[in-house]
Amino acid sequence: MALPPIVQAGDPVLRAAAAAVPPDYLGGREFRALVQAMVAVMRAAPGVGLAAPQIGVGLQVIVLEDTEALMAKLSPSERAARGRAPFPLRIIVNPTLTRREGGRATFFEGCLSVRGYMALVERDLEVEVTGLDERGAPVTWQARGWPARILQHEVDHLRGTLYVDRMLSRTFSCNEEVSGRWFDRPIDEVRAALEADRER
């Protein structure tokens, strides 16, 4: 079965608020097919998260997963700095996100719906999400570090917000430039280099 394409920036579905999933839709065949498609698309990309609007469906559903394979190129110190650790597949329906008092951090962030680019984005270090799982059971997850960043990014999609709305605009860069020039350099150094003329 062919996977649905990932919708790219410019499609109105990415700028609209997604609708809550009604109780009678949960657990049905159509809903199960949506979740299966989302997980398959995320893994094939590969990515660490996907929201239903990214495959053209305006419903409040997100899937998230991070694996050792996806972070294999990061050194132990880079993983520690990002708070990045693997976590199993999570499916969250109708999520509500709450900020925790854990500070904020800035790192490069990309998006499967803004193909080919990254930018520095400041996010909360710790958040709590509540919602439902794919069977309709209540879920709560308090996440810190990279999982918290993924959650914020995906919940933003359900509100019609892209990371480009939150980015430090002068750091917007092609993926090749980030990986070849900036990825392993301290964030303060990257900001100093790319934002040097921001007052002009």
Image (cartoon, rainbow, N blue to C red):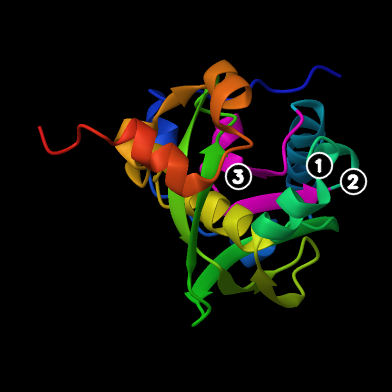
36 and 168: which is toward the camera: 168
Residue at point 29%, 36% (across, down): 195
Instruction: Tell me the quarter of the picture where residue 71 sits.
Output: top right
Which mark is first along the chain, 1 or 3? Answer: 3
145 and 160: which is toward the camera: 145
* Depicted 184 relative to depicted 81: above or below: above
Residue type, mark 3 in image = Ala
* Residue that lies at the very extreme toward the left in this rendered image: 200
Lateral position of residue 170 relative to residue 100, left or right: left
Q: What residue would you read off at disc 1?
A: 71
Question: Which span is picked out in magenta?
Answer: 46-66
- Where residue 121 sits in the image (x, y, percent)? 44, 47
Whether residue 56 is in magenta: the answer is: yes
| CA gap, disc 3 and disc 1 | 21 Å
Q: What residue would you read off at disc 3?
A: 51
Q: Secondary structure at mark 3?
A: strand
Q: Residues within 10 Å of mark 1 (few under 14, many from 20)?
A: some
